[in-house]
Amino acid sequence: MPEGTEQFLELRTLHSSHRRLAELLRPGMRVLDIGCGSGAITRGIAEAVGPDGAVLGIDPHAGLLARAKAAAGDMPQLDYRCTTIGDLGTQDRFDLVTASRVLQWLADPDEALQDMVRATKVGGLVVVLDYDHTRIAWKPDVPADAHHFYDAFLRWREEAGMDNRIAEHLPGMFAEAGLVDVEVSPQPEVTHSADPDFAEAAALWEQVVATRGHQLVGDGALSERTRAAAERAFAEWAAGPAPRRQAMHLVAVSGRRPPAPRT
């Protein structure tokens, strides 16, 4: 994750940013949060499971984990580890394993999902929250310079093996991983210019251009001139006088690990 990512990661909370997970959590649960970043949602998970529960947040980014640990406060039920789900090697331990906006960044999300299933107890839940980036909508539409960046962003992701439509594919992935009782919960991220937090929410893509955009430039996916123009364009759209609306297509999918078939 590029430097500066924590600016928008820390705006998230469990109840505003992972509503389906908040509905499923119960006191006393053991929960694994994959790709926990700076821990904004993970802290909410720890509050929900309470002192009788246990939460482990994992992330490969040491800098983000340092922020997570610093913000953890007095929560003995909360722990963090600098690792990935593939390297964790834990089996049959957690009542619930979750990944929020994480699988979209992986070249092999099916393998990560299999690792999540293995870490879950029989009868436990796997919960994934992720986007279909091809279905974003702005009203009024963003300027052409913003679209140039967004199109390059999608191409860059696709060429790196990332799935721009992973939200659409998650139910099939869950079934392929052997999960049962699969439920799909639309969780659209919609912000209107009348909302009190519109400025922060609408600044998302300006911040992505200012952080992730430099990776695209470094990889030759677009020029610095195009990146800078897009940053200005997104900022101008967010500050425009007309009523504005941004809608991102986000889906939560949950499934239960069944008992092993009898032989």
Image (cartoon, helix red, strand yellow):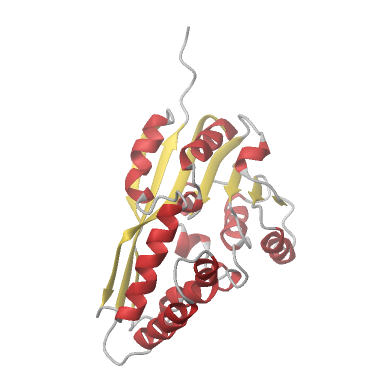
Residue 93: which quarter of the image?
top right
Q: Nearer the viewer, residue 24 or 257?
A: 257
Residue 238: which quarter of the image?
bottom left
Q: Nearer the viewer, residue 41 or 61?
A: 61
Q: Residue at x 49, y 38 (%)?
A: 113
Identify whether 35 is placed above or below 28. below
Query: Picture coordinates of residue 181 (x, y %)?
Result: 37, 33
Q: Nearer the viewer, residue 196 or 50?
A: 196
Q: Residue at x 36, y 77 (%)?
A: 146
Query: Picture coordinates of residue 242 (x, y %)?
Result: 26, 89
Q: Is residue 162 left or right of residue 66?
A: left
Query: How many discs mark residues in the rendered view?
Result: 0
> The N terminus is located in which quarter?
bottom right
Q: Residue at x 37, y 54 (%)?
A: 164
Residue 169: which quarter of the image?
top left
Query: Picture coordinates of residue 25 (x, y %)?
Result: 51, 47
Identify whether 260 is placed above or below 179. above
Query: Picture coordinates of residue 141 (x, y %)?
Result: 26, 78
Q: Residue at x 48, y 7 (%)?
A: 263
Q: Is residue 191 in view from this perspective?
A: no
Q: Is residue 140 in view from this perspective?
A: yes
Identify whether 262 is placed above or below 75. above
Q: Nearer the viewer, residue 202 or 191?
A: 202
Residue at the farthest top position: 263
